[in-house]
Image: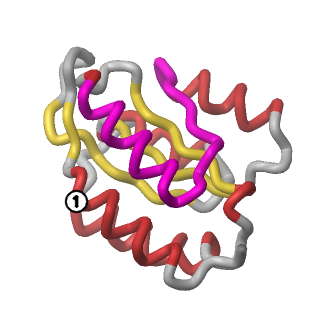
Amino acid sequence: MLTIISDQKISDWNQRDVRKIVNLKISEIAVFLPHCLKKELIIKTKELLKRHNLTNVFIVNGQSQLLNIIALRPGLKAVIGIACLIEIESAKKHLPLPQIRIKLSCDGCKRTEFNFQELESWLSTIFRQIKE
């Protein structure tokens, strides 16, 4: 059964998991973007991630693809994911890795968006503390 997840709940989960992520190497972090993001936002996001040397970036259709990628790459130990609330809740239940979750600001699986500044803020928090 899916429930409605509040922004505060997502923030609490992120605060808890960021403490685990900062102890990892950059190469152990994967970033998952939904295929439905606006093209210009995908480009902008990939540029930001590149500046932080995050190279494990995947554009996926949903959680099943994410889980397959994680299974095939055992060196990945944390996830930064941009997703709709349903995918966020499902990943919370089924993905046993620390996660930073950024929710889509509009759903619909077509030309979706998210709060880019929120991603920048979480990346800043992580990279102030992370190992090289």
- Residue 35 image-quadrant placement: top left
Q: Does the magenta stretch include residue 54?
A: yes
In the displayed structure, 71 sits above or below 45; it is: above
Residue at 54% over, 70% down: 17
Residue 100 x/y as whole percent: 46, 59
Residue range in magenta is: 40-62
- Quarter of the figure that contains the C terminus: bottom right
The image quadrant of residue 23 is bottom right
Q: Is residue 129 left or right of residue 29?
A: left
**1 or 122, nearer to the observer:** 122
**x, y percentage for residue 53?**
59, 55
What residue sits 40% from the left and 28% below the top?
Answer: 34
Inspect the image, locate mark 1, and give the three-letter code of the amino acid beneath it. Answer: Gln
The crowd level at tag 1 (other Cα within 10 Å; few <14, some 14-19, many 20+) is few
Quadrant where the N terminus sits is top left
Q: In this view, does 98 lie above or below 86?
A: below
- In the rendering, at what x and y percent does residue 52 appear? 52, 60
Q: Determine which residue is flagged by label 1.
A: 117
Work out which residue is located at the far left of the displayed protein and give it: 106
